[in-house]
Image (tube, coloured by chain):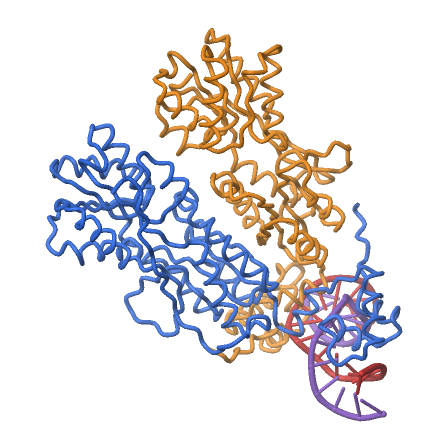
Chain colours: A orange, B blue, C red, D purple
DNA sequence: TTGAAAGCGCTAACAC
DNA sequence: GTGTTAGCGCTTTCAA
């Protein structure tokens, strides 16, 4: 258990197969340009010896790692309170493993960790990075770009300066919000409120913009900033009912917030959707379907976003197994959203 | 952007500092046994050049990676539906980064992936593995052990055969369940039901055992197997009310299940805790505190479990920075649970 | 204390 | 096609 059984080297495989190390290497890496009988011999030797290539040695010469870092800044506990990241991670993981890349997860717990992450990325452990830039003022993205690692961002980064070459994957937050609000308008609602997310995140800011696109001169009292949590949604809803007891619709910036709002509305005896129509955002199934009444919401395919992030990065890295079709620097992608009608609006 | 600025090597640092590569290496690795003036010169050179050691080269000779794999088998979507793994991951991540180890996340989506994971672990990318063995029949743990990678399990693995040298971290599920049920008994309840988790997981099985420890000859109709989800909790609760309408308490195997049960009880007009007392398990704050009424539950410190798993593994690996005190093969740890009283029981 | 030199295991030119 | 050889960048004896 303590003794490390010395793992066989390519050398050993070559010897056993009666070929040179180079040929053995060729076979291990696909076998192109090696004649059949030799291929078979080497394969057998690999099998018999239980040979597994030493990645460190390989990376040392190829300068590839077939590994990608996923960086998640987690200033708040909230990050894990909703399944958002989990779903993205899953999409990322699927795409990465489909192309034989490993996922290295870097969780940062505040500023102290940034240096560590920077060092890690600069240390050449990974070929690229997938970064979730949650907040406008987050220094992390800058650090990473500085480390010179190819990067794809999750969600549009909120930098005011137009840095070039930034690639990101995002949902059409603004368009989705517009569609939601238009739907409410179509329902004949006129006093439509909006509970926002944290406005230092572009997703929240974009949804607010979408709301404003439709409700051009909305009463400012109908807009309350919140934080994407159910508790925040409750608070916001109470505030709204106080400010404008006559409101007849609420567009919440995400489903969790909408769930909180729903709770308060029920508590206050407002019927949904008869008295107040409610729309959420995300279509997080466990929340949206289980809520009472089931939530009408703007669906975004979170797992697909993850998958896409990974795909863009791999393409940028020129992953051998992804080079079907267009190469070159990929550009950002904004995924469409769809309105899912349930009972709440 | 496309051109990879060739990163400086130790050689360059040594040249600039006017020392040999060996000395430069010593300084980079702590500087023991190098006289002060040289240390300073090398440090400066490192600074000026922005030198970062090439890990591949280092690993090639040291056979260490300072990286640990976290393997999560995810046969169901459920895994990410509750914050359980997220919390453990967080604990793990904290401990790992505190000791300069990287977290490599391996998500498996069914049997196809097992081979890949086995290969990866055998490939010597990581120094050890942290594995969550969800199900009794999961072949993964065996594969991993076979790969010869030092491993710590999250949750007691459910193998019937007593393999030796298995190290795991678990909560005292059985003891916690006992305490919960005893509490219900102390409240004067006599017709106590139990909604279990999936019984092919040891955590669920252990909680059931704890329930039985106290309710030695419970009516079998008072026990319903469920799946740790809110929807499952609802179904189970309905079933229970049908079987034994006179029940006066429910011990749910986790908080999500309890939340589902609570919903059904409210719907049926049963008052909690007056008519039916309810206890959950986990103390998942967003669920337990937000439920109506707030949930009495058995608390387990999930993040601490994660931290502990990492700590045990690092100790086993003889991590330089963890070697304070006891070395040697660490043994498994079972963390205590505590009953948290709120309004539901 | 410092330096010289020998690899760690592998890939990729370059010869044959 | 296949083999030979020169490193990739680093740590680590071993001498000095």
Callout count:
0
Q: In this view, does A123 lie to the left or right of B97?
A: right
In front of the other: B220 or A137: A137
Residue for point 56% across, 16% down: A221
Is residue A72 positioned above or below B44 on the image? above
Q: Is residue A163 left or right of residue B146?
A: right
Is residue B321 positioned above or below A260 on the image? below
Instruction: Quadrant for residue D13, please give it.
Output: bottom right
Q: Quadrant of the C terminus of chain A?
A: top left
Image location of residue B103, percent across then percent down: 56, 58
Residue for point 53% across, 72% down: B317
In front of the other: A1 or A200: A200
Q: In this view, does B275 lie to the left or right of A237?
A: left
Image location of residue A65, percent across then percent down: 65, 57
Image location of residue A208, percent across then percent down: 59, 22
Image location of residue B252, percent across then percent down: 26, 45
In front of the other: A290 or A234: A234
Residue for point 43% across, 19% down: A341
Instruction: Quadrant for residue A134, please give it.
Output: top right
């Amino acid at each position: 258990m303590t003794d490390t059984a010395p793992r066989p080297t390519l050398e050993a495989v070559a010897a056993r197969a009666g070929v040179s190390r180079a040929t053995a290497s060729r076979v291990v890496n696909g076998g192109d340009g090696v004649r059949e009988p030799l291929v078979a011999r080497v394969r057998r030797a690999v099998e018999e010896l239980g040979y597994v290539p030493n990645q460190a040695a390989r990376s040392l010469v190829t300068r590839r790692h077939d590994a990608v870092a996923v960086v998640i800044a987690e200033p708040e506990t909230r990050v894990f309170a909703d399944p958002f990241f989990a779903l993205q991670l899953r999409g990322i993981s699927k795409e990465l493993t489909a192309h034989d890349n490993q996922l290295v997860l870097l969780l940062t717990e505040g500023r102290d960790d940034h240096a560590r992450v920077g060092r890690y990325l600069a240390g050449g452990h990974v070929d690229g990075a997938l970064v979730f830039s949650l907040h406008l003022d987050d220094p992390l993205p800058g650090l990473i770009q500085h480390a010179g690692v190819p990067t794809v961002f999750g969600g549009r980064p909120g930098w005011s300066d137009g840095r070039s070459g930034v690639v990101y994957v995002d949902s059409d937050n603004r368009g989705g919000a517009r569609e939601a609000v238009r739907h409410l308008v179509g329902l004949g609602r006129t006093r439509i409120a909006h509970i926002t997310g944290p406005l230092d995140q572009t997703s929240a800011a974009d949804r607010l913009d979408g709301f404003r696109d439709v409700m051009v001169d909305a009463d400012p009292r109908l807009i309350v900033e919140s934080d994407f949590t159910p508790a925040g949604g409750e608070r916001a809803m109470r505030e709204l009912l106080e400010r404008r007891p006559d409101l007849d619709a609420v567009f919440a910036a995400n489903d969790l917030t909408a769930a909180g709002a729903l709770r308060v509305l029920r508590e206050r005896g407002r019927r949904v959707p008869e008295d107040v129509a409610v729309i959420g955002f995300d279509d997080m199934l466990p929340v949206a379907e289980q809520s009472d009444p089931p939530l009408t919401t703007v669906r975004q395919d979170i797992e697909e976003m993850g998958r896409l992030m990974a795909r863009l990065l791999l393409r940028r890295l020129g992953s051998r197994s992804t080079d079907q079709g267009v190469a070159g620097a990929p550009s950002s992608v904004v995924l469409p959203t769809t309105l899912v009608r349930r009972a709440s609006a």
